[in-house]
Image (spheres, rainbow, N blue to C red):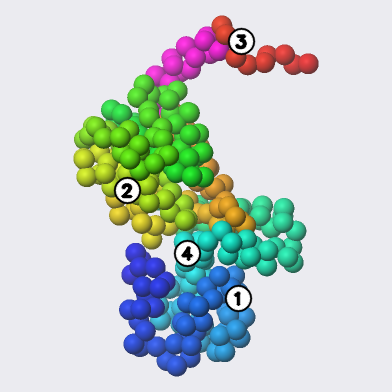
Amino acid sequence: MDSLNLLQRIEQKSSGFSKGQKRLAQYIMDNYDIAAYLTASKLGKEAGVSESTVVRFAYQLDYDGYPDLQKAIQIIVKTNSNSIQRMSLSSKRYEEKGILKSILYTDSERLRDTIHNGVDEGEFQKAVDIINKCHRLYILGARSAAYLAGLMGYYLKMLFDDVIIVDANSTSETLEQIYNIGEDDAMIGITYPRYSKRTILALQYAKNHGAKTIALTDNMQSPITDYADCCLIARSDVMTIIDSLVCPLSLVNALVTAVALLRKEDVEKRLMALEELWNEYDVYNRSLS
């Protein structure tokens, strides 16, 4: 059931729920934005059931305990909540702690979660190989993910001759830029909650036209994974009106570094030529004062 989200699991398992579990399921569906950050004890109290019922409910849904259930609720929050709900949620979440330390701590937690439960080494290496071997590389990220796509493209353009950062201003313009993508090409689609339909559609188009596809997203329930030959999972979290992109940024850094080291000799030649160009046109400030 790994590919099923929480709401799908509840629907499939509901016929076997006890009265207490039905009450708990209804509370979660009606108040997922509140339930997402409650302990098992507090969730039980809010739903009018015992803590042990909450724990048993998690196992009933085939989660490995309450922490996994809580993560599943948080995914629903990130996917379904609008910006106004996120603002309200974050206000409650940070009212007891300082904002700075709370967010830094949350980012560090998501990094640890990505290391232990997120990106797979085999998938990472597969992505490196796809990028290294492709004829032309397309990179697409819409909305806030556009900055991740831009940064990745900036560095990969130093390593390859044919890297295209796809403009995501509209669906038609996006498809026009990738209309001739083919079997020798690859495309990286980057999307985080709330997932961009444009990015998902573009990756689907690329896959349907024979290109190798890589998805950079937050979990395997993300809709973009359906069209990816390779999935890179880096966690995110809700931060007021924004999503934290610390983990995917770190993964972008690792991906570019791995590709560069794989092509070390060629990359050194390219960087030498670039350094000469930068020096000739005085691009960087070399003064120490």
Q: Secondary structure at mark 1?
A: loop
Q: Is residue 284 above or below residue 256?
A: above
Q: Which one is earlier in the sequence, the residue at label 3 or at label 2?
A: 2
Can you identify the residue that label 3 sits on?
282
Can you identify the residue that label 2 sits on?
201
Residue 220 in view (yes/no) = no
Q: Position of residue 219 (x, y in %)?
A: 43, 57
- Determine contact: label 3, label 1, CB under 8 Å: no
Q: Nearer the viewer, mark 1 or mark 4?
A: 4
Q: Which one is earlier in the sequence, the residue at label 2 or at label 4?
A: 4
Q: Nearer the viewer, mark 1 or mark 2?
A: 2
Amino acid on which the number 4 mark rests in the picture: Asn
Amino acid on which the number 1 mark rests in the picture: Thr
Can you identify the residue that label 1 sits on?
39
Q: Which one is earlier in the sequence, the residue at label 1 or at label 4?
A: 1
Residue visible at 21% across and 35% down?
183
Amino acid on which the number 2 mark rests in the picture: Leu
| Residue at mark 1 to residue at mark 2: CA–CA distance | 38 Å
- Determine contact: label 3, label 2, CB under 8 Å: no
Which dot marks residue 12?
Answer: none
Residue visible at 33% across and 79% down?
12
Q: Secondary structure at mark 2?
A: helix
